[in-house]
Image: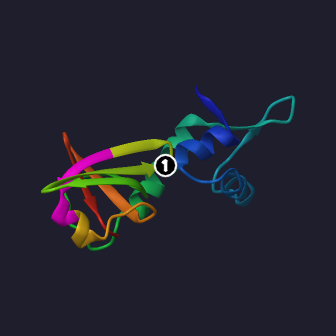
Amino acid sequence: MHKFRIGEAAQLLGVSTDTVRRWADSGRLSIERTEGGHRLINGVELAKLAQEISNSSEQEGATLSARNRFTGLITRVVADGVMAQVELQAGPYRVVSLISAEAVKELGLKPGALAVAAIKATNVVIESP
């Protein structure tokens, strides 16, 4: 059975270590302590919480077939004529999408903007929240 430290769990869930500690203190997440006092979280329980968080963070009213969604910050936009390359940093993940320059302009995509990458098969769709 896999067990994760607080920092590892936080990174996997995309939250801060303080948030994971609060969830453990409130009972939302149960922990075990090692002999050295380190807190460990059961991997199965962590996976259930990750699914719960994912399900609760899906946008209300959104009707997309894409289930793989990454919220992050636009880090780079390179537009040249008709097409544009948009880079999004979602936690530790860098997502790159090729979309029309017109879509970039309409969505107001520029470095520092919040955006969501919705991924279906080999296509990446960038949407403004």
Kindly identify which residue carries mark 1.
Answer: 50
Asked if residue 3 is among those painted magenta in the image, a careful observer would answer: no
| The residue positioned farthest toward the left in the image shown | 82
Q: Pick the quarter of the image with the C terminus.
A: bottom left
Total marks placed:
1
Q: Amino acid at mark 1?
A: Ala
On screen, residue 81 above or below 94: below
Task: Answer with the quarter of the image where residue 95 lies.
Answer: top left
Q: Is residue 34 left or right of residue 108?
A: right
Which one is in front, 129 or 112?
Answer: 112
The range drawn in magenta is 96-103
| The residue positioned farthest toward the right in the image shown | 36
Q: Pick the quarter of the image with the N terminus.
A: top right
Task: Label 1: state its secondary structure.
Answer: helix
On screen, residue 94 above or below 111: above
State the image coordinates of residue 61 (x, y, percent, origin top left): 27, 74
Residue at the spot 61% in from the left edge and 42% down from the top edge: 9
Asked if residue 98 is among those painted magenta in the image, a careful observer would answer: yes
- Main SS of residues in magenta: strand
Which one is in front, 25 or 104?
Answer: 104
